Image: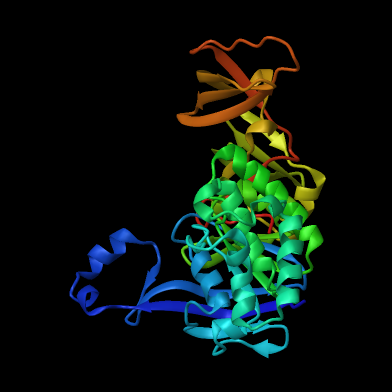
Amino acid sequence: MAKVVLKNLKKIYPYTEGKKKRKKGAEEKKTNLQITDQGVVAVQEFNLEIADKEFIVLVGPSGCGKSTTLRMIAGLEDITEGELWIGDQLMNDVEPKDRNIAMVFQNYALYPHMTVYENMAFSLELKKAPKEEIDRRVREAAEILDITQYLDRKPKALSGGQRQRVAIGRAIVRDPQVMLMDEPLSNLDAKLRNQMRAEIIKLRERINTTFVYVTHDQTEAMTLGDRIVIMKDGFIQQIGTPQEVFDHPANLFVAGFIGTPQMNLFDARLTRENGRYVVHTGGISVELSEEKQQRLAAKNVADQDVVLGVRPDHLMLCADGIKGQVDVSEMMGSSVHLHITTGGKDAIVIVPTNGAAASFPMGSEVNLIFGGNVAHVFSKDTGVNLEF
């Protein structure tokens, strides 16, 4: 279909007259976005090359600029600076209707007075496509999405999941070069979200198009994306496959954002002893794995205080280790989530039950250990992962 290239994209929302009169300090308290004389910078230095038929997910907290980026691709927001290419065509000044893209919105945006069939056929009718082709495309899309039986119904007679399928169907009948999806599952309950995630994965296999998907839900990002773009305050924090960003977070923000429960963080000291890097925390010392040794040595990382990150399922209970006290014990079926206070900080440990009863009363003492292959060391000053 088409690759999508975003080169140094920037979006600035100019001040309105009302905002000009506000004190600058008041503005800064409400947002972490950069504020300039021109206005609020919502997206900046955004560089990304999306391969043909790739599924890219933009993820981040509310206000990070992900939806603004998507809307610039769609042509619903003007590009302040930079270039947007779809295929071999520069799209900065091309009207949305001429970009050969389709967009699925969070709120479905279906016409309530039209049937499902009419909603799906509408864009093709505007293009004056032959009736036979319209009918063929609508029925093919309906079959793919398993909504053939609803073609004569109106949106009010459908559930939220069915409406979302109609919205997706309306997009795919156009056979777009690029499919844009802006938090399409956020209005659904947890069970429907799981079902629709699976449907989108199946859909992706059946239609040949490039996907750009926006969400604040890291589970959606991890399960759907070929690559994930993690954003914060208008900047890209990291781009990589789901496994890459989970195993090798670029900084403390990514480490805390990706993974459920989020990564545990401890104060620690990184030293180099006899040419080997060792991390010291909570009275224990752990030598890092060979892979980490090589990365740190290649950068000639010096001895320093660091923030140590260890994921909850990588901490283990032991006879002698980092001492902690159980605050809360959550039984999750196949595992127990222990909320522990250690060294004045909170930590979470996932303990597999393996089918056996496990009891950790509130206030009980535990000891924790971790392997050198699962320890992440971050700069205390900049928050960046010292390996990269």
Viewer can see residue 258: no
Q: Residue shown at 59%/72% (left/top)?
A: 122
> What residue lies at 54% left-to-right and 86% top-to-bottom?
95
Q: Quadrant of the C terminus?
A: bottom right
Front residue of this view, candidates 173 and 16: 173
**Among the 4 quarters of the image, the one containing residue 93:** bottom right
The N terminus sits in image quarter: bottom right
The one of 189 and 295 positioned closer to us in this rendering: 189
Residue plotted at (68% across, 73% down):
174
- Provide residue 366's location: percent of width, then percent of height: 59, 17
Q: Position of residue 387 (x, y in %)?
A: 69, 55
What residue is rendered at 61% in x and 27% in y? 349
Asked whether residue 152 is in view, the answer is yes
Q: As drawn, is 303 to the left or to the right of 24?
A: right
Q: Is residue 133 above or below residue 141?
A: below
Q: Is residue 272 left or right of residue 19?
A: right
Q: Nearest the camera: 271 or 353?
A: 353
Q: Is residue 303 above or below residue 312?
A: below
**Residue 29: percent from the left, percent from the top?**
29, 59
